[in-house]
Image (cartoon, helix red, strand yellow):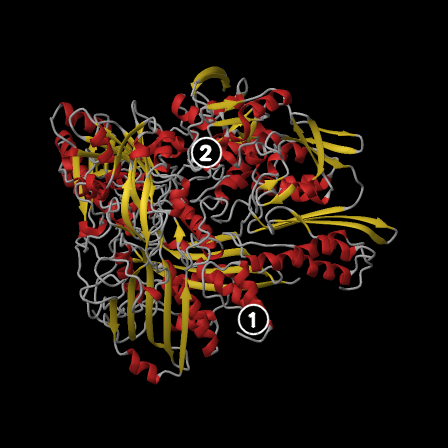
Amino acid sequence: MTVSSYFLPRSLPEALEILQRHGPDLLVMAGGTVAMPLINEGLSMPGAVMGLRRAGLDRIERTDGALRIGATATLTQLLDQDAIPVLREAARTTGSWAIRNMATVGGNLFTPPPGGDVAVALLALDASVILAGPTGERALPLADFFTGFLTNQLAPDELLVELRVPMTSDPAAWVKFGRKHANTPAVVTVAARLRWSGDKIADARIALGAVGPHPIRARQAEQRLVGTRLGPDAIAAAAAVATEDCEPFTDAIATDWYRRRMVAIFVGRVLEQLAPRAEPEGR
Amino acid sequence: MARLRGTGMAVVNYPTGMNLGGDPSQALVHATTSGSFVVTLSATDLGQGLRTVIGQIAAETLGVEYGEVMVDTADTDTGPHDMGTFASRATHRVGNAVIAAAVEARQALLDVAAEELEAPVDELELDGHGNLMVRGVPARSLKVADVAALAQFKYGRTIAGRGSFMKPRSPVDPETGAMDPDSTEAHACTIAEVEVDTETGEVTVLSMKSAYEVGRQVNPALVQGQIVGGAWMAMSHTLYETTAPYYPAPDHGPKDFSEYLMPGSLEQPEIESVVLEIPSSNGPYGVKGVGEMTANSPIPAIVNAIYHATGVRIDELPVTPEKVLRGLDARKAGVS
Amino acid sequence: MSAHLNVVGQSVARSDGIGHVTGRTQYTTDRTFPGMLHLKMARSPLHHARIKGIDLSEAERVPGFVRALTAKDVPHNRYTILGLIGVEPEEEFVLAEDRVRFKGEAIVAIVAETEEAAFEAVSKVRLDLEELPAVFDVEEALKPGAPIVTHWGNNTFMYEGHPCRRVRLGDVERAFGQADHIIEGVYNTSPIEHAPTETTGCIAVPEANGRYAVYTNTQALYFSLDNTAIILQVPGNRLHFIGGTVGGGFGGKVDVIVEPIATLAAMKTNRPVKFSYSRSEEMQVSSTRSAWRIYLKDGVTSDGRLIARKVTSYADSGAYSRQTPYALTKHAANAAGPYNIPNVSIDAYCVFTNRPPTSAMRGFGITMASFALEVQMDKIAERVGVDPWTIRFLNAYRNGDMKPHRKLAEDATLIETMQAAATLVGHDLPDEFKAMTSAPRAGSHVEGR
Amino acid sequence: MASTIVTFEFGEREVEVMVRPMTTLQIVLREQLGATATKDGCRQGGCGSCIVLVDGEPVMSCLLPVEDIAGRRVTTLETITPAEGLHPIQQAFLDSYAFQCGYCTPGMVMTSKALLDHHPDPSGDDIGEALAGNVCRCTGYRPIIRAIGVAAEALRESDGEQPR
């Protein structure tokens, strides 16, 4: 923890300027919930750190058919918005209260699995990331942002400044399954959003967390749903094929075997939440 | 999805004190000028409330108010030797030592009072509230505080006592294992109820109901604290905790409270208990040790409840959802 | 002892309560001292390795580095806490000498002006290690050809010539022959961390008179003082241990692991030195509850009487003894459970493996035996065809019964405890069990005494 | 490694500290201000024993560079303890035996304070959710949950005339 410089820019231009000046060795930190534990124990010893807590990137606002979430908006702020309920659920099931007051939505994209739950919901919502660099901003679908375990499309001279989520009235659902009821790493996280055309599904998004190197889409499962009425057979088929969409790992929480098994269970449970209310038939 | 419920039971006994003895505890007690008493120890309070119960035992034996006893622990320059706080030994061992010290201090107090009251010392009694008197003659009484001051300034005496307790060290016969491994034994019986999700293997403990027999409760609220906290720890050991999640493989050892799983504030089974008091022959006021044992009987009770809910026998801790699920799979496949 | 009690039996308020709810209670590391140095440990990254070299040159150049301590700096470099009560042999090292036997074993203590400098210097200690084969399973460790963890040639603690603590009563093999049912089980448990919210730690402070005050959260002040005096080869009167307030122990703070090296560092620097475990050290390096493997074989009559119990237990001690050999003795004394069984054979092995040493924890030697025994009792009940209450009432021990370790039972109240539990949960017991008591049986060893 | 000066409100008073870069609020409170009610249990944001309130919201002070909260108001167990007597939450913890070793207690009380400021009449689930970031190894949480219920009632009865 021999940090020699700690920068606290008060604006995005100032932050970008500091980043250009110090280059890729600068550790960029938002809420600090991932970086600080490593620094505190001497496991990470950056020479220079830039904290974004005061850079003015924490607004959440609804404009142009999108919810624009500043990268350093906290999970508590996400919990307090009511434009997109599934994001509230995602925030509510992440970390503890004090952690949610610190952890940021942008930072969640840089949290190694099984963390990074909020990004799973964002993925199902077709969110885009806005990256700012020396030559301006660019937008990228979140689905294209992740490239591997803790790797992504962010250039060394860029900052993640915003998450942009298209406003939608599509029904969406969220389940995080951990070993405890709160403040727990995920065994698996599932977010789903369905677009209906009449009584059939026109388009589907299913995103999975904690079962791959980063939040991933269950694309085969999504395809399996399109054109169905989301009956029990369609749900079962999508749940089964979702296990082929993931690349689960073993950690202290669960084995890859168990995670894969739970992908099927919880994809099924999430879709059941979204299924049309059938007439009671004593199921 | 099915949720299956089951109930299981288990009983335990638990020995009090370092098993082979040879573990002394010592205590000193002295009066201040104002008639308060200081108990000096080197035993440690881990949070179980040792200072409090030792203060109660000292007050009881001295015959003064609890609030007049201060427990000073722990500093090796002032506190006499104590083996340490472990093995459910502290209340039993230190308590016995404190009683011995308090009896001696009480005698010194009564000797001064006898002289002052010009009464035979064996006719004096303490009322437990800071007064001593000639038995049956309330008019001939003194406040303990006044006796303490008289001892200091009129008679030039100390009101003090030394106490020690040690169960002598006993050997083990290496061939037969013949030994004397306990001072006394406390007992518990727990009935646990669980619910098991057959799709995920998740186990929810719904309730843990226990009977405890702990000799004498010095402080029932603190005994309850051990019972409730111990039941929680037992549930935690049963379902969650390990530093080597895939033991004996050494990999994936947790490094933080996120990976080291323990139930939290939302995993709250119903906990109910009844406490029997059948005084032990050798504990202070009949005490037996209750600190450690409260985490014991709930563990097999929960595991047995899982079996009665599902038909799956898990003989390996912790009982993770994966183990339950694999057990359910095996039953379904007709293996077992 | 006393018909009327004034305060024993009352739920008086805790005398330390106001301190706790106001945060004024002073725990060990709530203290700071002018000029205090920080000690951090360079540890083995391997489970088992030969130490070929230690290069401190880079670490010494870190700004704020004060000094490093290695094995040769420790006057009596043996950490054998139970040596105080005569347990042998001496084996663990305060700082590793030629070999490390578990991942996380301490090799070099770094003392620095700040925690940051200490961390940085630790990261720059260069260890030249030759990896050795490691063993992690208690039964693998006992097989011929297994990597040997100890320095005495096998992987068990020796109890007066035996590789296990033995208890023998009656003749189990003969009784198995007479039993109607033989029920066998094997039970496994995992190592468990004490996880106190306050990590293990101390601050050693030179006093003006040539003594050292050691503020510590040990569970046993004199145990820690006496062991520190032995390791540092100083008279006990040079040491002054201050503690008594502990942020959770559960047995983990009976180890004397931080005080000797912190005190040595204070002696070598003549400055206060703080050594407090990080949470990950507490989780990964500090002692745990042992993992156990327990084999049970029971002989039972058709009417549910346990007539023989054979117990073979293996406790995974990790790389060194600490308190675990003693746990096996306590285990062996209690491993037949609270039952009256005429024929018992217990072999309890303390086995060494290449994992962090294990030590005392709440329920020392017994918690995991209770797990095995009480799950086994359910299996017996099922085999015999009686309910779980019945099997326990039928076999419950009573005062005057001969326990496997040949001490007659006293203060037995299992029967009364089960009766109270049945009432609590509304379980209606048969009259026979309602009437039962723990009073000595007719013809028992204490009858008519 | 230039030190910087940071000013913030510590309860009712303004304090000024000189720190090396990225010194955490936890370290500043404990080592510079002597405010050791804020505990040091993990420095990983995992145990909650260092929870303090910044502008009324609970945060893990071990993860917070003090520079980040310049000018803001920090509330700790010291600042809510009245000069005489106890805050109703403290009293409820004492009366409910809601601690054993006491090491988690400051974080528990601060989380409770924030909870009751936001939700004067919390449900059992509200309490459970609020405490999900506070580790207690001794009590099993039940006495703590009970204490918060007792405190909530006491605070409602006193109609908010308690120290904030």
Name above or below for residue C439 compared with residue B133: below
Residue B222 in picture, x, y percent from top left:
39, 44
Marks 1/2 in contact by CB < 8 Å: the verdict is no
* Left or right of residue D66, residue C273 in this image: left
Badge 1: how crowded within 10 Å, few (<14), some, or many (20+)?
few
Residue displayed at 30% across by 44% down? C106
Q: How many marks can you see?
A: 2
Q: Chain of mark 2?
A: A
Q: CA distance from mark 1 to mark 2?
A: 46 Å
Side (left or right) of D122 relative to A87? left
- Label 2 sits on a secondary structure element that is helix
How many residues crowd around disc 2 within 10 Å: few (fewer than 14), some, or many (20 or more)? many
Q: Nearer the viewer, residue C403 or C214?
A: C214
At horizontal 33% and vertical 66% (from top left) the residue drawn is C313
Describe the element under mark 1 as helix, strand or loop: helix
- x, y percentage for residue B67? 32, 33
Residue D66 image offset from top left, x and y in percent: 49, 23
Tag 1: residue type? Ala
Q: Where is residue D129, by image quadrant?
A: top right
B335 displayed left or right of B109: right
> In this figure, which residue is indicated by the disc labeled 2?
A39
Q: Nearer the viewer, residue C361 or A120?
A: A120
Instruction: Identify the subunit bearing mark 1.
Output: B
Q: C98 above or below A224?
A: above
Nearest the viewer among C18 and A199 is A199
In which quadrant will I find the N terminus of chain B? Answer: bottom right
Instruction: Identify the residue position indicated by label 1 in the image.
Output: B330
Quadrant location of residue C219? top left
Both on one chain, marks 1 and 2?
no
Q: Amino acid at mark 2?
A: Ile
Percent of width and height locating residue C351: 30, 61
Q: Nearer the viewer, residue A54 or C44?
A: C44
